[in-house]
Every structure is written in C-alpha cells, then in structure tokens.
Image (cartoon, coloured by chain):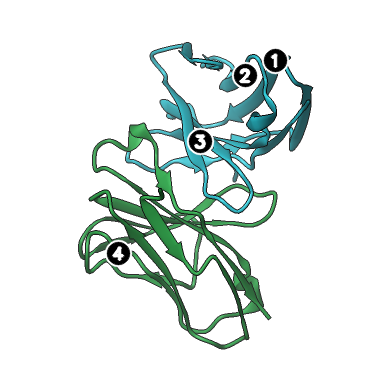
Amino acid sequence: DQQVKQNSPSLSVQEGRISILNCDYTNSMFDYFLWYKKYPAEGPTFLISISSIKDKNEDGRFTVFLNKSAKHLSLHIVPSQPGDSAVYFCAASGGGNQFYFGTGTSLTVIP
Amino acid sequence: EADIYQTPRYLVIGTGKKITLECSQTMGHDKMYWYQQDPGMELHLIHYSYGVNSTEKGDLSSESTVSRIRTEHFPLTLESARPSHTSQYLCASSELGRANDGYTFGSGTRLTVV
C-alpha cells in the first residue's frame, strides 16, 4: 500500500512562473518530510526538508508547505527556471531512518 | 564529485547469471540503503544496513542479498538473475542518527535481464 502519493506524474510551467508540486501521505505517524530532485541518469539529490513542528520551510527559490490535518505537502518553486526541469520526489519518515518515497512528478520549465 | 559510487551504471545480462552491483561511499556514513525503482513507480527499500556486519531487509521483498564487511562498501548480489529483476537499483547512505539530513544517493545501476 502506497503511503506517499504524488498524483501528478508531470507538470509544465513557463519560465519565471511558479511551479507547485503536490504530495499526499496516509500515515499520521510521519513527522519528517523531504523533497528530492532527480535528473536523468543521475541519483536523486536532496533539495529541502520540513519537520511536523513547522508548516513552512524556505530555502531560496524553494518553499515547502506542510498541512498536517490534510496530510498534504507541497513544494513551490519561484521563479521557475529551465534548469529546474527534473523529476521531483517527496519522501516521508516516521522516525527510524526509513523514508517512504512517492512516484515522482516530472517538471518541465519552458523557456 | 560524487561521494557515493555505483558500478556498473548499466548492465544487460542473461537469465540465470549471478551478478553483483557495487556501491561504495567515501563519507564514512554508517547507514547504507538499496532502493529499487521501476519506471514511473516509487522507490522501494529492499535492503539497509546500520553498520559493519549489520544488514536488514526492507519493505519490498527481494531475492537479492547484501553484505557489509566494510563501512564504505555495500554490494548487492543476485545469485540467479531473472527478467523480473529488470529495474533501476539506487544505493544511498546517511549518517547514523542524522537521516533527517537526507540521504546521499548514487547514480544508480540500470539492470536489464534478458
């Protein structure tokens, strides 16, 4: 049973606009969430994280929002750049060092 | 420069062959992981290790085995490859007690069994 879901397999956004990637989870015990970015033929790289004691974490152009009651998190990229085109995975953990990953959303930023 | 190395990057092999996927990291991380990912699917944890001589199976059942004789090395072995083993295999590592900093992933091995 998939505990972390990314229901949009792909997203296209114009350069300079906002990209919003969404992620839903089912396990209420999850208390730490990460976003990874993956280019073709490379492994995922860590992008940004958020713990359940926060509802927002910002790092430059990247902001992650967490809505615990809805079991939903989102990644905002503003402004979007062509180099942001990649597959984005969200991951969640309830402790114990094991993370559960979503299926990924492929973002294309159109110049 | 990569801190975690996986070889080979691509492998096409016949059914019934024994294969070993290599993973090495230079960061001194205690924890290491093997994930399996099919196209368009989530990453599934198949093996992990807390340190030398420690190995555990992940959530996804796998016919592969792993060993951890040295901190930096975490190879994955398939004794008899089958077409159902065709997938991408990703190795990752993290510091013990600091997994919330995120994993460091290798570039992956794309395995095709024909």
Location of residue B98 by image quarter: top left
Quick check: can you spot residue A95? Answer: no
To which chain does the residue with label 1 belong? Answer: A
Amino acid at circle 2: Ile
Q: Which chain is green?
A: B
Tell me the number on the disc at residue B42: none
- Residue at coordinates 56% horizontally, 16% vertically from top-left? A61
Query: According to the image, label 1 marks what residue?
Result: A18
Secondary structure under the numbered disc 4 in the rendered image: loop
- Same chain, labels 2 and 3: yes
Amino acid at circle 4: His
* Residue A41 sits above or below residue A9 on the image: below
Query: What distance separates the C-alpha of mark 2 from that of mark 4?
Result: 36 Å
- Same chain, labels 3 and 1: yes
Amino acid at circle 3: Ala
Query: According to the image, label 4 marks what residue?
Result: B73
Secondary structure under the numbered disc 1 in the rendered image: loop
Query: What distance separates the C-alpha of mark 3 from that of mark 1?
Result: 22 Å
Asked whether, in this view, residue A78 is left or right of residue A101, the answer is right
To which chain does the residue with label 4 belong? Answer: B
Decide which of B30, A99 is in the foreground and name it.
Answer: B30
Q: Colour of chain A?
A: cyan
To which chain does the residue with label 3 belong? Answer: A
Secondary structure under the numbered disc 3 in the rendered image: strand
Amino acid at circle 1: Ile
Q: Position of residue B107 (x, y in %)?
A: 50, 54
- Residue at coordinates 46% horizontally, 83% vertically from top-left? B79
Query: According to the image, label 3 marks what residue?
Result: A91
